[in-house]
Image (tube, grey):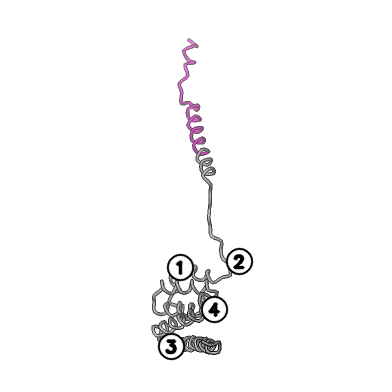
Amino acid sequence: MSSSAGEKELLEQASSFDALAEEAMGAMGRGEFREAVGLFDKALRVDAKFEGSEISSERADVAYDLGCCFAQLRDFEKARQWLRRAVLWGVRDVDPSVDEHLAPMRNAADWSDVLESFLPPTERVPAAVLVRSRRQNAGRNMDALKKLVDEEEDDDDDGGSFEEDDDDDD
């Protein structure tokens, strides 16, 4: 295959991706979300063939749009998967908190996690993680055991024993 034929094929594939993505967006606009899913899927396959392992910004946009389609279809698990993929692939300039296509997901228990995944890493709430070594745990356990033993000894000293001082006074 000559270089001009190879370039022509690449242009056709890119054009095919764009055409499929545009057709899918039209289907979304008409509320035909199942059709849009099929078209977006075809577009991703064309893009994967065209781009290889490179993740294009267009692929990230399609992943986000697939998340929106699955939200509209009430398949929230697939919607979350595609939205996570969109974030991993670097989707930009989207705001899921106001996107009408994601409205069905807003009552889901993990909606705040979905929203947070779209924040830049510096704005995310840090996970509350408590890490202790075995030595720290053992030390804490020993402190608790010592306190318990000390409390038992204090109970014994506070009138817990009988003194025979009264017999000596007779």
Q: Name the kind of residue labelled 1 in the image.
A: Asp
Q: Residue furthest front?
A: 1
The boundaries of the magenta stretch are 143-170
Tag 4 residue? 56
Packing grade of label 3 (10 A; few <14, some 14-19, many >=20) is some
Residue 165, given in percent of the width and then of the height, sits at 49, 15
Gap between marks 2 and 1 measured at Cα? 20 Å
- The structure residue drawn at horizontal position 53% and vertical position 55%, both measured from the top left corner, is 129
Give the vertical position of 99 relative to 125 (above or below): below
Tag count: 4
Which quarter of the picture shows residue 79?
Answer: bottom left
Q: Is residue 92 visible?
A: yes
Tag 2 residue? 122
- The structure residue drawn at horizontal position 53% and vertical position 76%, both measured from the top left corner, is 55
Gap between marks 4 and 1 measured at Cα? 28 Å
Which circle, 1 or 3, is nearer the viewer?
Answer: 3
Tag 3 residue? 27
